[in-house]
Image: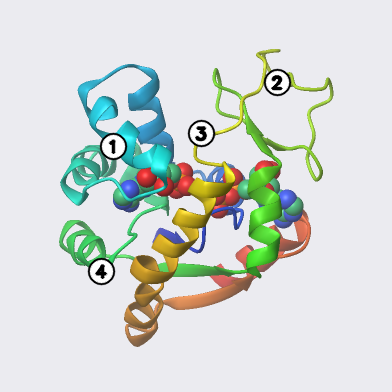
Amino acid sequence: MNRIVLLGPPGAGKGTQAKRLATELGIPHVSTGDMLRAAVAQGKSLGKEADEYMRKGLLVPDALVLGILRERLASPDARRGFILDGYPRNVAQARTLAEITPVDHVLYFEIPESVLVERMSQRRSCPTCGTVYNLLTNPPRTPDRCDRDGTPLIQRPDDTEEAVRTRLAVYREQTLPLLDLYRNQGLLRTVAAAGSVEEVNARVRAALR
Ligand code: ADP
Ligand code: AMP
């Protein structure tokens, strides 16, 4: 089965690859970051609780994230597999995930930190449909407007220099230990995540074979 976890630092291109892979494999892209941002945008109580952590670049408390994840993985379209992007992010979350579902592949997106900082500083997204652009590598056809619906693009509030620094530190401290955990389970495949979207897509597909 294709129960896939994408692991890697913020800005590594996990969301970009997950969206393509979801179409190619016919399984859903499950992004806890996207779900939390949707909860914030819709003014849900979960969003109100999560917003402050997200703005600072800190992890949202495990119990809040677990609720939305559990619900999403229980929906019928996730029965034939899923691409999990942004979960697990610490050892406790990895343990919880193992209790909810087995995982078949863990792909680690390896990339130099200098590339990440540049990718995040140039990232823009559409608040209406969620399409993600990059001003340098994947710009919209009309400056600052979404190609799909013309909505003015926004910069994520956690793509500021300070929040990015925090997110990278949180990643190193809390998420990196998961590499050993999944390596020891024989699930980890490393994907070189620098290079064009097409090049990385080819490496991702090769890693899944
Ligand atoms: P993540 O989900 O890992 O945080 P994203 O998929 O949002 O990362 O990508 C971060 C930024 O880098 C976005 O602006 C995206 O358009 C851009 N990007 C993604 N993959 C590549 C790539 N292979 N080459 C250049 N830019 C990329
Ligand atoms: P992402 O879109 O994956 O970069 O996530 C953006 C932000 O959402 C993170 O910096 C966290 O604040 C929050 N977040 C997303 N996924 C998780 C998770 N699994 N656990 C805790 N916080 C999360």
Q: Residues within 10 Å of mark 1 (few under 14, many from 20)?
A: few
Which disc is residue 157 wearing? 3
Residue 26 in view here? yes
Q: Give the mark nearer the N terminus: 1 vs 4.
A: 1
Q: Which mark is residue 146?
A: 2
Relative to 183, is 13 above or below?
above
Give the residue type that dot 2 points to. Cys
Q: Which residue is mark 1?
A: 76
Residue 194 occupies quadrant: bottom right
Closer to the N terminus: mark 2 or mark 4? 4
Q: Is residue 126 left or right of residue 49?
A: right
Quadrant housing the C terminus: bottom right
Could you tell which of marks 1 and 3 lies nearer the N-terminus? 1
Please, what is the three-letter code of the amino acid marked with disc 4?
Val
Residue at the spot of label 4? 91
Q: Position of residue 76 (x, y in %)?
A: 28, 37
Label 2 sits on a secondary structure element that is loop
In three-dimensional space, the C-alpha distance between marks 3 and 2, rounded to whole angstroms, equals 18 Å
Identify the amino acid type marked 3.
Pro
| Residue 5 x/y as whole percent | 42, 60
Q: Which mark is residue 98?
A: none
Q: Against 113, is 197 above or below?
A: above
Q: Earlier in the sequence, mark 2 or mark 1?
A: 1
Taking depth in this image into account, of 32 and 155 the one nearest to the observer is: 155
Q: Nearer the viewer, mark 1 or mark 4?
A: 4
